[in-house]
Image: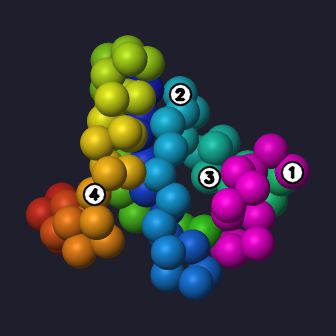
Amino acid sequence: MWYVYILQCKDKTFYTGVTTNLKRRVEEHNDSVLGAKYTKGRRPVKLIYSVRRKDKSRALKEECRIKKLSRAEKLKLLDFYG
């Protein structure tokens, strides 16, 4: 199972990614050198959205779709699922 997730950074920006282990990946973003370059200077990050996908291909397509959304559209997505 793959997860597409959105993190909210300390500066209120969003980061979107994919992983097979959501708990581990969020911990990496907050506490490890394995976190994304984008989130390293914006810690702590908070998981605000996740959705499961059956395979990596579907997860990457969903990640790409989300990344193309404007901030306002992302807020609507979060509101809808929140």
Decide which of tag 3 and tag 4 comes sooner along the chain.
3
Element at label 2: loop
Is 41 magenta? The answer is: yes
Query: What is the count of numbered marks?
Result: 4
The circle drawn on residue 69 is 4
Residue identified by numbered label 2: 20
Residue at screen point 68% across, 61% down: 38
Q: Position of residue 21 (x, y in %)?
A: 57, 33
Q: What residue type is labelled 3?
A: Val
Mark 3 surroundings within 10 Å by alpha-carbon count, few (fewer than 14), some (14 through 19), many (20 or more): many
Q: How much space separates mark 1 and mark 4, taking CA atoms? A: 28 Å
Element at label 3: helix
Q: How much space separates mark 1 and mark 3, taking CA atoms? A: 12 Å
What residue range appears in magenta? 33-44
The relative height of residue 28 versus residue 9 in the rendered view (above or below) is above
Does residue 51 appear left or right of residue 17 in this picture?
Answer: left
Q: How much space separates mark 3 and mark 2, taking CA atoms? A: 11 Å
Q: Which residue is nearer to you in this view: 66 or 30?
A: 66
Element at label 1: loop
Does residue 14 appear left or right of residue 26 in this picture?
Answer: left
Q: What residue type is labelled 2?
A: Thr
